[in-house]
Image (tube, rainbow, N blue to C red):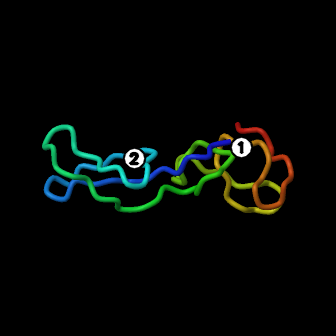
Amino acid sequence: MDSAQRYRLRAPSTGREIVIEAKPGVIYRDEQSGEELEVVGEVLPLAPSKSALPWAVENLRTCNCCGAMAQRDLNECPTCGRRMAPLT
């Protein structure tokens, strides 16, 4: 189970983005420009989560029981709790 929350950080002038497990009170800087990065958003799923995959189209599948979306690396549906069919 993943307990650390991941955040998307962006350099304002260049638009470069990274996704890291950021800690509060720590200032993160861009490796190339040295510019301070700003938090753009939290990466779903929110911590704590059984999945390590971010919510993106290529990482999701549909539960065969309830039809809810779930990450591909989960065996049980987080919505209904039933075991999902194997990936093909």
Give the residue number, with chain letter if any, for mark 1.
74
Count residues near mark 1 (Cα–Cα under 10 Å), then give few for <14, some for 14-19, many for 20+.
Answer: some
Separation of marks 1 and 2 at Cα, in angstroms: 21 Å
- The total number of labels drawn is 2
In the rendered image, which quarter contains the N terminus?
top right
- Give the residue type at disc 1: Leu
Quadrant of the rendered image containing residue 88: top right
Label located before the other in sequence (1 or 2): 2
Looking at the rendered structure, the secondary structure element under dot 1 is loop
Pick whichever, 29 or 50, lies toward us: 29
* Residue 56 x, y percent position in the rendering: 51, 53
Q: Is residue 37 left or right of residue 21?
A: left
Count residues near mark 2 (Cα–Cα under 10 Å), then give few for <14, some for 14-19, many for 20+.
Answer: some
Q: Residue lying furthest front in this view? A: 25
Q: Residue lying furthest right in this view? A: 82
* Residue 26 x, y percent position in the rendering: 35, 49
Q: Nearer the viewer, mark 1 or mark 2?
A: 2
Identify the residue at image location x=29%, y=50%.
27
Q: Is residue 6 left or right of residue 76?
A: left
* Residue 50 x, y percent position in the rendering: 69, 46
Instruction: Residue 21: give its label.
Output: none
Q: Is residue 87 left or right of residue 8?
A: right
Identify the residue at image location x=29%, y=47%.
28
- Give the residue type at disc 2: Val
Looking at the rendered structure, the secondary structure element under dot 2 is strand
* Residue 12 x, y percent position in the rendering: 19, 59
Pick whichever, 68 or 29, lies toward us: 29
Give yes or no for contact between labels 1 and 2 (Cβ–Cβ under 8 Å). Answer: no
Instruction: Residue 19: give its label.
Output: 2
Against 52, residue 45 (above or below) is: below
Pick whichever, 87 or 15, lies toward us: 15
Quadrant of the rendered image containing residue 32: top left
